Image (cartoon, rainbow, N blue to C red):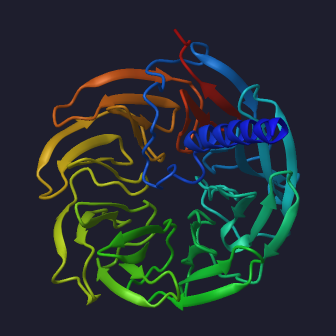
Amino acid sequence: MRFLWILAVVAALTMGTYASRASEDWPQFRGPTGEGHAASTKLPLSWSSTQNVVWREEVPGVGWSSPIVYRGVVYLTTAMLNNAGNPKSLRLLAYDTASGNLIWNREVLAVSKPPPKHAKNSHASPTPIAEGEHIYVHFGHLGTACVDLSGNVLWRQTSLGYAPVHGNGGSPALVDNKLIFSCDGASDPFVVALNKNNGEVIWRVPRVTTAQKTFSFSTPLLISVDGQRELITPGSGVVNALNPEDGSSIWSARYGEGYSVIPRPVFGQGMIFIGTGYDRPWVYAIKADGRGDVTDSHVAWTTFRGAPNTPSLLLIGDELYFVSDSGVASCVDSRSGKLHWNERLGGDFSASPIDANGRIYFTNERGKTFVVKASTQYEKLAENDLGEHTLASLAASGPSLFIRTEEHLYRIQEPTR
């Protein structure tokens, strides 16, 4: 009996440890829900390149995937370049969250003669996603793979080649046994679901659009509306709501010639909020309970003022926040689109904002993070400068922020009191 009691105590402690870790995981692009929300009440308010830096580690290669945090490890992808500046090896890196030590550096895909990319992009821009004992790594048109927590590649999928424009960008989503992502290239765009256990295609559906430029880079979002699950996947000229089981269409809404769509959608108040891409971005609020083409019936409101091309939106309660690529931050009423405030932060922006404990973190391309109060009244709480170029979005785990710059990975945390 005593032996069984000891086993029960050990099991309880182990489960408690895993539960604690799980509550601090940031397992995908934009965190646990995919919408930029951090549960922590103790994220740092102030830092610099020397203040409140727990550690700073070099990141080999070149890449703009955002960090994820999973079971005490930070994962990033990167591309190692040859002497001509072209990628020769696409890799997954694993860093210990406590010490910053590089645990392993594994090649996922070897590359030869990749298509050209935009100067602002990298060959390792999509963010990994973690679940169970696996990390799923995506490099757009170059391929997708599953890696275990020791860095062993379990499967690769490289048969979905398409003609990219400006390289890769959108990250995948996990739904049940499916890894789902968009393949919006120069022509014949499509959305595909892979079997997460072996990489085989479960379904593949074309994206029907009238946009002349069909390339885009958005990340899907799974939502539930009146018990119906919908996979929201924006592309050039159209946003689609698909049934994740088979890829069949539930509804779609058109927005003209918008292309190179990057922001990940957010959901609330029964509506999907999206950015419509270049050349002139708009923010659309679309009621998510429609069927068929809902362009004329379910678009609740739109605005172009301060709309982003690149950073994703952030919905907190009744307010929708966003920052334009040129650095103008906005807060609007999510139900009506009424503007509460519109303020210039400064600098150019690519990273998507996150929020925690009533604060919003906006990071610009120069490595400066503006912390703003989540409120209908604008109030800047802090301005923190790392002085390094960055396009990646922040990750949050417990009381720490993880920031990827062009050359380094930072763990930022205020001293415990």
- Toward which corner of the image does residue 89 lie, by quadrant? bottom right
Which residue is nearer to you in this view: 215 or 172? 172
Say which residue appears at 70% left-offset and 82% top-offset.
160
Which residue is nearer to you in this view: 156 or 183? 156
- In this picture, residue 161 sits left or right of residue 25: right
Say which residue appears at 61% left-offset and 80% top-offset.
193
Can residue 153 be seen at all in this image of the molecule? yes
Q: Where residue 267 sits: x, y (%)?
A: 33, 61
- Toward which corner of the image does residue 230 lie, by quadrant? bottom left
Which residue is nearer to you in this view: 81 or 241? 241
Say which residue appears at 55% left-offset and 53% top-offset.
29
Instruction: Name the image quarter holding the N terminus.
Output: top right
Can residue 110 be seen at all in this image of the molecule? no
Say which residue appears at 36% left-offset and 32% top-offset.
346
Q: Where residue 39 sits: x, y (%)?
A: 45, 38
Q: Where residue 6 sits: x, y (%)?
A: 79, 35
User: Up-down: is 39 above or below 207?
Assistant: above
Q: Where residue 250 sits: x, y (%)?
A: 36, 87
